[in-house]
Image (tube, rainbow, N blue to C red):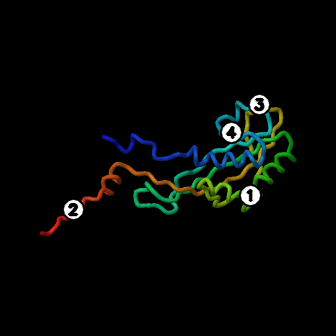
Amino acid sequence: MSRPFDQQPTDYDSVIGSLISEIEKITDCPVIPNEQIAETKELPFISYYPLMYDDPVYSDPIINSGQFEATISIDVFCKTLSEAMKKAGALHVFLRDPYVRQEVRNDGIVIASVESPQGRAINSLPFNSVHHHGFDVTIRYARHFQSPIDQISNVDITTNFKEE
């Protein structure tokens, strides 16, 4: 018997993945998950960290289907302050650009908002000097998950008897 928790209802890798690949194209820098910052030896790079995800915007009462939001922290790490400001500023501008928004929309993502870049602080990095700027991006995506009970309720059990 199939149980709802035997399947993975979410696919965050593909949702975040298309945004990450777009960021790589814009910045020409590697984009890594936040957990790999301490292992990275070369600057510049971009890191990301999902702050909030699966916040329902429009969905059914049991949150299996609908539109959801995720807020992702995007951080730019560079050797100089000027480079960090340029890369973070350019990324901020391009993520608000209609062309880039259409690019990610083709992958089923809507960029709902892009906050202003800010200087941020992080300690214990394997660099002599690092400048770190970042901002949060809120995206919207759709999900449709059918649990076994949804499949059962979708079965047509009507019978049509012929009258003779």
How dense is the environment of label 1, judged by Cα within 10 Å: few (below 14), some, or many (20 and up)? few
Extreme bottom residue here? 163
**Residue 41 - label:** 3
Expressed as whole percent of the image width and height from the top left, the position of residue 20 reads: 67, 46
Q: Given this view, does label 4 or label 1 mark the residue nearer the observer?
A: 4
Expressed as whole percent of the image width and height from the top left, the position of residue 29 reads: 77, 41
Q: Given this view, does label 2 or label 3 mark the residue nearer the observer?
A: 2
Tell me the residue that label 4 is attached to. 32
Does label 4 or label 1 sit earlier along the sequence?
Answer: 4
How dense is the environment of label 3, judged by Cα within 10 Å: few (below 14), some, or many (20 and up)? few
Expressed as whole percent of the image width and height from the top left, the position of residue 118 reads: 76, 52
Secondary structure category for the residue under label 1: loop
Q: Is residue 139 above or below residue 2?
A: below
Q: Which part of the image, by quadrant, shows the C terminus?
A: bottom left
Extreme front residue here? 164
Tag 1–tag 2 contact (CB < 8 Å): no
Q: Horizontally, is 92 left or right of 57 in the view? A: right
Q: Given this view, does label 1 or label 3 mark the residue nearer the observer?
A: 3
Query: Looking at the picture, which amino acid does disc 3 mark?
Result: Lys
Query: Looking at the picture, which amino acid does disc 1 mark?
Result: Ser
Q: CA distance from mark 4 to mark 2?
A: 56 Å
Q: Given this view, does label 1 or label 2 mark the residue nearer the observer?
A: 2
Tell me the residue that label 1 is attached to. 116
Tell me the residue that label 2 is attached to. 159
Q: Residue at x 62, y 45 (%)?
A: 17
Q: CA distance from mark 1 to mark 2?
A: 60 Å
Query: Looking at the picture, which amino acid does disc 2 mark?
Result: Thr
Q: CA distance from mark 4 to mark 1?
A: 21 Å
